[in-house]
Amino acid sequence: MDFMLSDKDRAFKAHCRAFAQQRLRPLADKYGETQEVPAEMVEEMRSAGLFELLLPQELGGPGLKALPLCLAREEMAGVYCPADVTLAMQGLGGLPINLAGNQAQREKYLGPIGRGELLTSFALTEPGAGSDVNAMTTQAKETADGFVINGSKKFISNGYAAGAVTVFVKTPQEDNPRAMSAFIVDKDTPGFSVAQRLEVIAPHDLTLLEFKDCLVPKENLLGEVGQGFKIAMQTLEVLRMSVGAAAVGIGAAALAEALAYAKERVQFGAPLADYQAIQFKLADMATELAAARGLVYRAAMEKDAGAANASRASSMAKLFATEAASRAVDQAVQIHGGVGVLKGSAVERLYREIRALRIYEGTSEIHRIIIARSLLAEAG
Ligand SMILES: Cc1cc2nc3c(=O)[nH]c(=O)nc-3n(C[C@H](O)[C@H](O)[C@H](O)COP(=O)(O)OP(=O)(O)OC[C@H]3O[C@@H](n4cnc5c(N)ncnc54)[C@H](O)[C@@H]3O)c2cc1C
């Protein structure tokens, strides 16, 4: 699939692969599965120039382009999940500032985010508002001193490690009671807290955030009051396809494990790889992952080129890649037999890690709805 890439993109992908194999793999062995965001990992990612992808042009970066983000996530996700999540969260938290931030906000936040000095997160989901974003109840009330936020945000990745969070809340207006706005909230703001650290099947920094009479200065409003929904959706349009890229990376890691095991494991006097039933599984895994990779690259290229249907392509890439990779990981476990479900085996970890990708940044069902609506609208 690399034939789709320019020489520059191919070189960047090779750089990310070398970084993942040579620098991240030892860190994965050292820190293992963790709810923390290891500072050493962040420093290594910074040294490799990965956060610079997020720097806007005026700060010497490329501005966040979808394709390099996808290539980096593809190479890192199968090697060390916290690194992949951290790059994604820098994108999710930083892109709203890139899209809607004024000059002061850009200078204050984007430089540190792009240098990996400031970790950030993206807080949209609430206990009562997941797929139905508009059901959110967290509200900001405008006062003379700023905006007072009350409510909570659930399932927020890197919420504990983040120094600033980009949060989306309701700001009802007379003419628009459902209006939503986006704010940057610094970690030390009084009234803001990490209420709970959530434990998931594949551990990462996942939190419940609380806002209790949290006064956020007016200069932390992103864009204008009422623009929050648009900012959130524009951000997700870029990041969703990169979830597909991460899924391809996890699927590819599972395929590599399955190939090695099928060659090594002997049953009935021959390696598993000699049996056609196993060969068909390997063939299906590789074929579906190649198709997924193609959809992800196409979506990223369309987005970077400003194509009209980029949102549909992003949903297609996320939907297909996360489902195909889940099937591939499941087959890798099957090929490993009992060893595949032993705690500590590589495919057992990948099996747990792939699961949430079909849920976050829009479930598979929600992406089918987005794709179908777009098709139906086009059909007139
Ligand atoms: C590991 C992890 C990390 C996350 N990180 C973040 C983060 O950093 N920031 C953030 O804001 N959020 C984050 N989330 C939240 C995630 O985006 C939501 O979990 C997701 O949007 C689904 O919402 P929900 O869990 O409330 O499920 P629900 O919306 O309650 O859905 C439950 C089920 O019903 C289905 N469903 C819902 N509506 C429909 C419909 N109309 N038609 C058909 N089926 C439907 C869904 O597809 C799903 O299968 C994370 C979640 C996880 C698991």
Image (cartoon, rainbow, N blue to C red):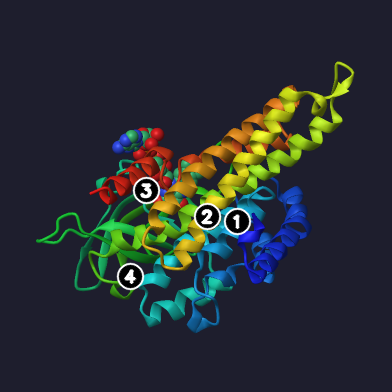
Q: Which residue is mark 1?
A: 73
Q: Is mark 3 within 8 Å of ligand 1?
A: yes
Report the number of discs.
Answer: 4
* Mark drawn on residue 242: 2
Q: Earlier in the sequence, mark 1 or mark 3?
A: 1
Q: Which residue is mark 4?
A: 222
- In percent of width and height, residue 166 lies at 40, 62
Residue at 61%, 60% in the rendered image: 4
Q: Earlier in the sequence, mark 3 or mark 4?
A: 3
**Residue found at the very far front of the displayed protein:** 379
Task: Determine the secondary structure under disc 4.
Answer: strand
Q: Earlier in the sequence, mark 1 or mark 2?
A: 1
Q: Is residue 126 among what the camera can see?
A: no
Q: Residues within 10 Å of mark 1 (few under 14, many from 20)?
A: many
Quarter that holds the N terminus:
bottom right
Task: Determine the secondary structure under disc 2.
Answer: helix
Q: Are marks 1 and 3 in contact (CB under 8 Å)?
A: no
- In percent of width and height, residue 286 lies at 67, 40
Task: Quadrant for residue 170, please give it.
Answer: bottom left
Task: Quadrant for residue 326, please give it.
Answer: top right
- Under mark 2, the amino acid is Ser
Most foreground residue, 242 or 380: 380
Residue at 53%, 68% in the rendered image: 118
- Under mark 1, the amino acid is Arg
- Under mark 3, the amino acid is Thr
**Residue found at the very far left of the displayed protein:** 174
